[in-house]
Image: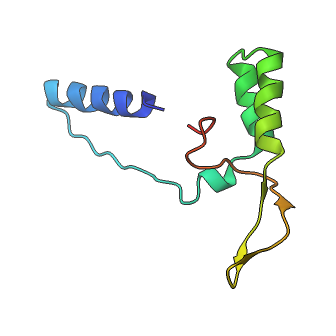
Amino acid sequence: ILDGILIANEVVDEAWKSKKELMLFKVDFEKAYDSVDWGYLDDVMRKMSFPTLWRKWIKECVCTATASILVNGSPTDEFPLERGLRQGDPLSP
């Protein structure tokens, strides 16, 4: 998560030392937590050499999530979520 900050800092420092012009921009994806694809998350964990059992546990926690909505102060029936991570969850970045 902090790699981007570290890389940006190094790029700025190098440009400053070598007196090169530099332009940076930051992109913040709206609703990033809501749009995480679970298949992609599993691919990333596999490529990062997460053990199969750990991947299974994490997928079980993420893929079995349900939600409900308050309508006029009363919760609706629960429904399964199809993608995304719960912001603030220890499993979220």
Quick check: 46 above or below 21? Answer: above
Residue 56, relative to residue 28: is it above or below?
above
**Image position of 6 with respect to 49: above or below:** below
Looking at this view, name the residue that lies furthest to the bottom.
72
Considering only vertical position in the picture, is 62 above or below 79?
A: above
Q: Position of residue 45 (x, y in %)?
A: 71, 25
Q: Which x, y percent locates residue 5?
A: 37, 33
Q: Residue at x 67, y 47 (%)?
A: 85
Residue in front for this viewpoint, 53 or 4 = 53
- Front residue (pair 20, 51): 51
Q: Position of residue 64 (x, y in %)?
A: 84, 45
Residue furthest out toward the front: 74
Q: Position of residue 89 (x, y in %)?
A: 60, 42
Name the side, left or right, on which 88 lies relative to 17: right
Give the quarter of the image for residue 17: top left
The reply, left or right, for residue 8 in relation to residue 93 is left
Of residue 3 and residue 23, the one placed in the foreground of this image is: 3
**Residue plotted at (59% across, 36% down):** 90
Q: Looking at the rendering, in which quadrant would you find the C terminus?
A: top right
Query: Looking at the image, what colour scheme do you see?
Result: rainbow
Q: Residue at x 78, y 24 (%)?
A: 55
> Which quadrant of the structure image shows residue 41?
top right
Total residue callouts: 0
Residue visible at 82% across and 43% down? 63
Q: Is residue 3 left or right of residue 49?
A: left
